[in-house]
């Protein structure tokens, strides 16, 4: 039985990857950080029996900013594969917490690689780094592929640039099997609630049910290549099963604006949104003419990534990659899931 260690196991991708690896017969260990409230809602269903009891799926307390915990866990688990998914992953927040973002996202990757090296695990343990399309930032070529030059546009992306190169460096310097998956945006019903897709589907569900008045957004012109997280985690695993370690772009090759996402999600919920006006004065009205979407400059970023579109030809050829979930299905799955959740909350409130 192979053993995997996942950092960021409580996040969106950590949950889907754990499910996938358990289905593949792995023993899965996850690192979670200490929080004052429970943070395991996405993975509680993966425990057999009582949460926290050892089995095929086990959790360890650790933090990307704390070498001692990472080294201790690596030494105890001696995994065949490490998936480094932990990060302060919010681009806008990284402008407010740049130093912490560098510590967890850049130095965190170094801490893991260095622990693999000095524990003598370099011949055994394969390493996956969660790299990102944000590396392309101010894009130098469209579509973006593995050879496209990077131009990061946020403290998050700059930290991830360090993590990308330290992964390449440890591969070249110490012969560690280490790969970067350069993943474009991927979403799901368990996406973090402050990323734009989930923010939209949650808000529209509540507007439909009458429990929220309007949705406030930042740059609605931003263009993204959105895929489904469930599909993308399979590629993380495949990247670590090859004869030699390489870096791969994972993307759908389709691009939509934030505005188009809003319209699509509204359609799914049986609403229609019509946009009018420009810039900060742009509004979205429902079929009765009521304003339900507004621009709020609070959500603008000091430097924006306007457009991202990936070319995953290399992954298609070498890993057999085909994105399984089309954009329409992704939006539908998210909108319907949030509608059910909002309806249940409304019922609970009404029943006191
Ligand atoms: P999430 O934000 O959903 O999850 C991040 C995870 O990292 C959470 O488990 C979080 O813990 C954990 N974490 C954050 N800081 C620390 C820390 N200091 N120590 C330990 N754990 C920490 O992200 P996703 O699942 O969406 O993304 C996974 C990875 O992939 C991230 O590295 C992200 O930057 C990267 N990525 C994501 C893309 C996407 O579109 N989703 C695209 C490309 C790259 P907690 O639950 O306690 O907050
Ligand atoms: P992103 O995702 O920055 O691409 O990073 P996010 O969903 O936060 O933003 C996408 C685009 O939408 C615009 N936008 C808004 N964004 C948020 N969060 N909230 C708003 O109200 C809003 N209005 C407009 C943003 O300006 C942006 O252009 C995600 C994260 O998962 C990263 O960790 C990952 O590396 C990249 O995707 C690939």
Image: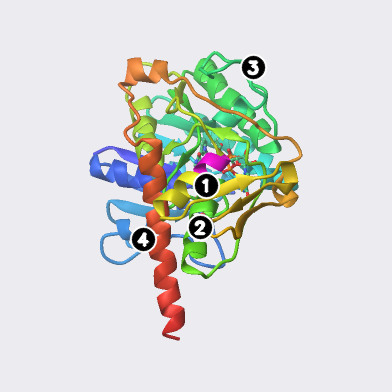
Specify the quadrant of the image occupied by residue 244: top left
C-beta proximity under 8 Å, tags 4 and 2: no
Q: Where is residue 74 in the image (x, y as percent from the top left)?
A: 45, 42
Name the N-terminal-most of marks 4 and 3.
4
Tag 4 residue = 44
Q: Which of marks 3 and 1 is in front?
A: 1
> In the figure, is residue 45 to the left or right of 275?
left
Q: Quadrant of the N terminus?
A: top left
Vertical position of residue 32 compared to residue 264: above or below: below
Q: Give the range drawn in magenta.
A: 258-262
Residue 262's disc number: 1
> Who's the residue at 47% across and 36% down the image?
226
C-beta proximity under 8 Å, tags 1 and 4: no
C-beta proximity under 8 Å, tags 2 and 1: yes
> Who's the residue at 76% across and 39% down the image?
302
Q: Which of marks 3 and 2 is in front?
A: 2
C-beta proximity under 8 Å, tags 4 and 3: no
Look at the numbered disc 1 and give the secondary structure of its residue. helix
Look at the numbered disc 3 and give the secondary structure of its residue. loop
Name the N-terminal-most of marks 3 and 2.
3
Tag 2 residue = 204
Q: In which quarter of the image is the C terminus?
A: bottom left
Residue 54 inside the magenta-drawn segment:
no
Look at the numbered disc 2 and give the secondary structure of its residue. helix
Measure the alpha-carbon separation of dots 3 and 2.
35 Å
154 or 58: nearer the eye? 154
C-beta proximity under 8 Å, tags 3 and 1: no
Measure the alpha-carbon separation of dots 1 and 4.
31 Å
């Amino acid at each position: 039985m192979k053993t995997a260690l996942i950092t960021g196991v409580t996040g969106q991708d950590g949950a889907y990857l754990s499910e996938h690896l358990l289905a593949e017969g792995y023993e899965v260990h996850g690192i979670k950080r200490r929080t004052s409230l429970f943070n395991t809602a996405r993975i509680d269903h993966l425990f057999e029996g009582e949460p926290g009891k050892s089995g095929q799926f086990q959790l360890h307390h650790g933090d990307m900013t704390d070498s001692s915990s990472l080294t201790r866990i690596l030494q105890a688990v001696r995994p065949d594969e490490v998936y480094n998914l932990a990060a302060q992953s919010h681009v806008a927040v990284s402008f407010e917490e740049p130093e912490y973002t560098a510590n967890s996202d850049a130095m965190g990757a170094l801490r893991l690689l260095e622990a693999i090296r000095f524990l003598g695990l370099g011949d055994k343990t394969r390493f996956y780094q969660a790299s990102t399309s944000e590396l392309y930032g101010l894009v130098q070529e469209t579509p973006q592929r593995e050879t496209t030059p990077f131009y990061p546009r946020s403290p998050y992306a700059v930290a991830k640039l360090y993590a990308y190169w330290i992964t390449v460096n440890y591969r070249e310097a110490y012969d560690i099997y280490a790969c970067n998956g350069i993943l474009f945006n991927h979403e799901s019903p368990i996406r973090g609630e402050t990323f734009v897709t989930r923010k939209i589907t949650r808000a529209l569900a509540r507007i439909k049910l009458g429990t929220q008045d309007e949705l406030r957004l930042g740059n609605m012109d931003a263009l993204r290549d959105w895929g489904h997280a469930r599909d993308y985690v399979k590629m993380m695993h495949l990247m670590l099963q090859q004869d030699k370690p390489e870096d791969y772009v994972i993307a759908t090759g389709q691009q939509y604006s934030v505005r188009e996402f809003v319209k699509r999600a509204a359609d799914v919920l049986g609403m229609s949104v019509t946009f009018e006006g420009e810039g900060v004065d742009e509004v979205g009205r429902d079929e009765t003419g009521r304003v339900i979407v507004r621009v709020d400059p609070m959500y603008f970023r000091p430097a924006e990534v306007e457009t991202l579109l990936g070319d995953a030809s290399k992954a298609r050829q070498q890993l057999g990659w085909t994105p399984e979930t089309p954009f329409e299905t992704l939006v539908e799955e998210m909108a319907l899931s949030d509608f059910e959740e909002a309806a249940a909350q409304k019922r609970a409130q009404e029943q006191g």
